[in-house]
Amino acid sequence: MDLGPLQGSDHNVLAYKLEVRTKQKLSTRRIFDYAKADIEAIKRELNAVDWYTQLGSLSAEDGWRVFRDKFEALEHKFIPEKILLLKRKKPLWMTHKAHKVVS
């Protein structure tokens, strides 16, 4: 016995398929390539500084700034930079759970 559509039911079923296409935004970021750094040159430069004269009369915070600035200058001088390509696998608004469902 084939009942066909449910008899006596006042419920309707709505089915749909939603297809969304998004553009993946590629972004780049410049980072230091520490694997190719000239560590020996950085050590020589740091050892050549008279730290007692440079930092002796400074507060801890000011001394830290002097050291940080020197070290950052050495990073730019002796560590090459590389471009890191960042490609998102899912849109920013998509949750992990939603990504699993559509993957």
Image (cartoon, grey):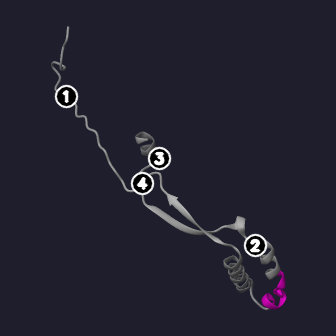
Residues at marks 2 and 3 touching, judged by CB atoms closer than 8 Å: no
Asked whether residue 48 is drawn in magenta, I would say yes
Which quadrant is the C terminus positioned in? top left
**Labels 3 & 1 near each other (Cβ < 8 A):** no
**In whole angstroms, how far apart are the C-alphas of marks 4 and 1?**
36 Å
Q: What stretch is highlighted in magenta?
A: 47-56
Q: Where is residue 55 in the image (x, y as percent from the top left)?
A: 78, 88
Q: What residue type is labelled 1?
A: His
Q: Residue 38 carries which label?
A: 2
Q: Which mark is residue 57?
A: none
**Residue under the image location 19 percent in, 28 percent down:** 11
Q: Mark 1 points at which residue?
A: 11
Q: Position of residue 96 (x, y in %)?
A: 47, 47
Q: In this view, does 76 lie above or below 53?
A: above
Residue at image position (71%, 76%) is: 78
Residue of label 4: 91
Q: How far apart are marks 4 and 3 (CA)?
A: 10 Å
The residue that mark 3 highlights is 96
- The CA distance from mark 4 to mark 2 is 39 Å
